[in-house]
Amino acid sequence: MISKLIQVAVALLCLGAAAAVLRDNGLPTSASRMPGSGQSRAPAIGAAAPSFTLQTHRLEDFTLRPAEGATVLNFWATWCQPCRAEMAQLQAMLESEPESPRVIAVNLGESYTPVRKWVEDLGLTFTVLLDPQFSAASLYGVRGLPTTFLLDSQLMVKRIYFGPVSAAELLRSIDGIAKGS
């Protein structure tokens, strides 16, 4: 009984400390790295998004370059349940919105076979990339999944979403970018 009370008290203290940090510092606006870690700083809102080259799930090379319109750059994995729901929304957005953004989904750390099966099972038609060595994830400072970057036509970071984001939210943000807000 006493042991259980101590566990609950420790848990409440941890939650309180986390709440205090969030209250004092707010939620992050970029996925930055710690100084002195030897890793480059991740792009922040307003910064240029780094380019990279990875293989698609069809084993073709793909290089991230500027393109007409917005780009949704999504980092995900097959074991991530929120990623599954998000992927379905991204696919639905592409099918229903004539002016939808380019979607690029970067799978972290998994091999070709499970990714290809997942893409086929969900009927995804957008670009799916394999990042088995976490090279793109490292460039972007990805710390949790899903993480989504909304980029403009020149690959400038306009928004960063930590955790799932809805297609409706992405479309609102893209509309805001088009209107200059």
Image (cartoon, grey):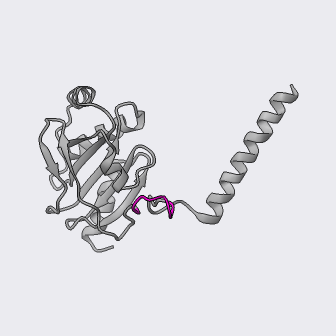
State which quadrant residue 127 falls in.
Answer: top left
Work out which quarter of the rendered image holds the N terminus and state it: top right
Q: Residue at x 57, y 63 (%)?
A: 26
Residue interval drawn in magenta: 34-41
Q: Along the horizontal axis of the image, is 13 left or right of 27?
A: right
Residue 169 can be seen, yes or no: no
Percent across and percent down for residue 163 are 44, 47
Residue pushed farthest bottom? Answer: 180
Q: Along the horizontal axis of the image, is 32 left or right of 101?
A: right
Q: Along the horizontal axis of the image, is 24 left or right of 38?
A: right
Percent across and percent down for residue 92 are 24, 41
Q: Along the horizontal axis of the image, is 135 left or right of 154?
A: right
Q: Quick check: 114 above or below 22? A: above
Residue pushed farthest right? Answer: 2
Residue 36 can be seen, yes or no: yes
Report the number of numbered marks: 0
Work out which quarter of the rendered image holds the C terminus and state it: bottom left
User: Does 39 appear in magenta?
Assistant: yes
User: Does 132 appear in magenta?
Assistant: no
Residue pushed farthest left? Answer: 60
State which quadrant residue 109 falls in.
Answer: top left
Viewer-side residue, 115 vs 101? 115
Percent across and percent down for residue 107 are 30, 40
Q: Residue at x 66, y 52 (%)?
A: 18
Q: Residue at x 26, y 44 (%)?
A: 105
Q: Quick check: 135 above or below 34? A: above
Q: Residue at x 36, y 62 (%)?
A: 159
Instruction: Decide whether the magenta segment is chiefly helix, strand or loop.
Output: loop
Percent across and percent down for residue 16 are 72, 51
State which quadrant residue 43 falls in.
Answer: bottom left
